[in-house]
Image: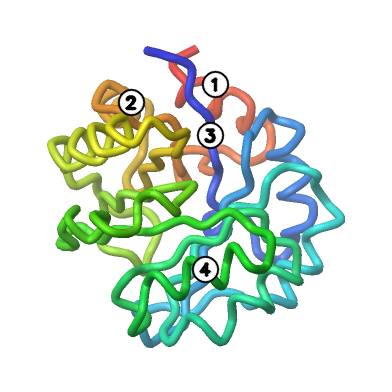
Amino acid sequence: MTAVRIAPSILSADFAKLGEEVRAIDEAGADYIHIDVMDGHFVPNLTIGPKVVKALRPHSKKIFDVHLMIAPVDQYIQEFADAGADIISFHPEAGAHAHRTVQMIKGCGKKAGLALNPATPTDVLDHLIDDLDLILVMTVNPGFGGQKFIPLLNKIKDVADRIKATGRKIDLQVDGGITPETAKHAVSHGANLLVAGTAVFKDGPSGYQKNIKALRGE
């Protein structure tokens, strides 16, 4: 299994001590800090807003990978950028003009990601991929942690092939039901960045390093 970057999702962390949790996964070898933002409208759950992202920012210098599962999305881009996001990903269904949203993110000096739900076709990338820095393939329906991996391996490979055709460096991120076993499948089909919540946080801080290494196949 090739080396892969791991982005633990703090959705599975202990919310009573999020700052400590972010420091712990940073020290345990996390490459990115994945922050799931849900609005109870676009997805059936409520999580955190830009004030929490801003409060967490001093706890790690790692990349803050912010996944916005909110609609409408455009009006919050600047707030999350100002709060300390490094990458902002959104869903094409969350606004009327996906290209405009990408340009807003870039205009804030941040990297732009597009998130594809299990039923979102990859042809949505046709006129966007040249402006993207990251493509997130969801292998669960967004909204909750701890779900079972949907084996969308052909979709992951399709996106990987599209990225290769551009000749550009675009991260292929997979999120949903990632375990050491499903991680192997995602990476073998082209993923280079994995989001994992339960698989990282399940054993408490003493297990974070071990769990992150297991996801990398080390």
**Are discs 3 and 1 less than 8 Å apart at CB?**
no
Mark carried by residue 91: none
User: Which numbered dot is residue 103?
Assistant: 4
Measure the C-alpha gap from mark 3 to mark 4. 27 Å
Question: Which is nearer the N-term, disc 1 or disc 4?
Answer: 4
Please, what secondary structure does the residue beneath circle 3 have? strand
Distance from disc 1 to disc 4, alpha carbons, whole Å, reads: 35 Å
- Which x, y percent locates residue 90? 43, 67
Of the numbered discs 1 and 2, the one sitting upstream in the chain is 2
Whole-angstrom CA distance, mark 3 to mark 1, is 9 Å
Q: Residue under label 2, please give it.
A: 187
Mark 4, other Cα within 10 Å: few <14 / some 14–19 / many ≥20: some
Q: How crowded is the residue under tag 1: few (<14 C-alpha within 10 Å), some, or many (20+)?
A: some
Dot 3 or dot 4: first in sequence order is: 3
Label whose residue precedes the other's in the sequence (2 or 3): 3
Q: Secondary structure at mark 4?
A: helix
Residue picked out by circle 3: 6
Label 2 environment density (alpha carbons within 10 Å; few <14, some 14–19, many ≥20): many
Label 2 sits on a secondary structure element that is helix
Write the residue at 48% across / 24% down. 4
Query: To which residue does mark 1 refer?
Result: 213
